Image (tube, rainbow, N blue to C red):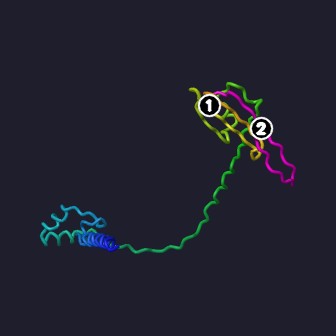
Amino acid sequence: MLKDGVVLAVICLIVVGGIFAWLLQNPRQSIGAPAQPQIQEAAASSKTPAEIAKSSVVRRKQVKPVEEVVEHPVIAELAPAAPAPAAVVQHDPPPFPAVEQIATGVNEDAITRTYGYPTLSAVTSTGGHIIETFVYVRDRGRSSTVIRLEDGKVASAFSRTQPVPAAGVSAPRRPLNN
């Protein structure tokens, strides 16, 4: 216990000594002080008092007198009304893919161009072929179409639709496995 206290005290003394040494540094060498080139200091020290007085006289001659400010009444003009914000154009959502509409061998780009991007997609590789699965869903998951693509072309597609429960009837969801 005592050994830990001594080690802690030594570490504290080292930290306090480091902070003290840092504070005693020349302010021109500290991080926050602006950098001043040494050439300006040498040039300033080589001037004679007469040259310094002459340069200050020149500076006084360059100062322009302050002009008198005259206030005029201001007539407020209303700015033209800002144009109304442009109406947001809402495009119709892409059609929902039905199995009958999806032909085998169609390219992946044609599917996404026609039906939009899928709700869920997965990619895997099997036997040197890239297998993609697109899942399109609507009606909160009650209707879904799954499109399986092999090497970027449609290999198969199937749809599933769950019955809509009657209004006001509370029924547990049925599992999807048949």
- Can you tell which mark lies on residue 23? none
Residue drawn at the location 65% of the way across and 55% of the way down: 83
Q: Secondary structure at mark 2?
A: strand
Residue 53, picture quadrant: bottom left
Q: On screen, 178 above or below 49?
A: above
Question: What's the amino acid at mark 1?
Answer: Ile
- Can you tell which mark lies on residue 160? 2
Return the residue found at the far front. Answer: 1
Crowd class of label 2 (few under 14; some 14 to 19; many from 20; radius 10 Å)? some
Question: From where the camera sits, is residue 63 visible?
Answer: no
Residue 37, picture quadrant: bottom left
Residue 174 included in the magenta stretch of the image: yes
Residue 166: percent from the left, percent from the top? 87, 49
Is residue 158 or residue 172 the one in the foreground? 172
Q: Which residues are magenta?
A: 153-178
Q: Mark 1 or 2 closer to N-term?
A: 1
Crowd class of label 1 (few under 14; some 14 to 19; many from 20; radius 10 Å)? some
Residue 130: percent from the left, percent from the top? 59, 30
Residue 124 included in the magenta stretch of the image: no
Q: Which image quadrant: the N terminus? A: bottom left
Is residue 98 or residue 46 the one in the foreground? 98
Residue 160: percent from the left, percent from the top? 77, 37
Q: Is residue 67 left or right of residue 142?
A: left
Return the residue found at the far top. Answer: 105
Question: What's the amino acid at mark 2?
Answer: Arg
- Label 1: which residue? 131
